[in-house]
Image (cartoon, helix red, strand yellow):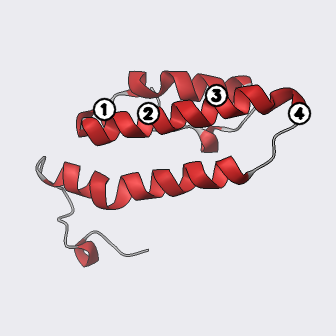
Amino acid sequence: EAGLEEQGLKADPRPVQVPSVLKDYGLPHYTAWIGQQDTLEPPEDMAADWDTWIADSTAARDAVKEDPNTAFDPAAFEGVNGQAEAMGLSQECFAGPTA
């Protein structure tokens, strides 16, 4: 993984860099992660919850696209993280910052 300087970023990014970092790195990573999760086959009794979680994760991603500041608001991810927790998924499956 390339360091910040190799990516053309300063160690302490300025606020103007944040939307660019999200657009160029964060959102593509989150989009790929959602796609990977969507290819998994959940147990039959979890299928509806899983589909809702994928759809809500996509909506959370779209909200960040619309307003990059959303990426730093734990409340914006409470729904999808609560769904992940309710399904017994680890915190590695959580999105965004956690409070």
Residue 67 x %, y % = 24, 35
Q: Determine the secondary structure under disc 2.
A: helix
Say which residue label 3 marks.
52
Instruction: Out of 45 and 9, give the one closest to the viewer.
Output: 45
Residue highlighted by disc 1: 70
**Image quarter for residue 92?**
top right
Q: What residue do we see at 61% from left, 37% from top? A: 54
Say which residue appears at 35% left-offset and 33% top-offset. Answer: 63
Among numbered discs 3 and 4, the one appearing first in the sequence:
4
Q: How far apart are labels 3 and 1 at the CA level?
A: 20 Å
Q: In the drawing, does residue 17 fall left or right of residue 68?
A: left
Q: Secondary structure at mark 3?
A: helix
Secondary structure of the residue carrying tag 4 is helix
Q: Quick check: marks 3 and 1 in contact, CB under 8 Å?
A: no
Mark 3 or mark 1, which has the lower sequence index? 3
Do callouts 4 and 2 mark residues in contact (Cβ within 8 Å)? no
Mark 1 or mark 4: whose residue is earlier in sequence = 4
Mark 4 lies on residue:
44
Q: Which mark is residue 60?
A: 2
> Comparing marks 1 and 2, which lies closer to the viewer?
2
Q: Tell whether 6 sits left or right of 32.
A: left
Q: Are marks 1 and 2 in contact (CB under 8 Å)?
A: yes
Observer-side mark, 3 or 1, equals: 3
Distance CA(mark 1)–CA(mark 2):
9 Å
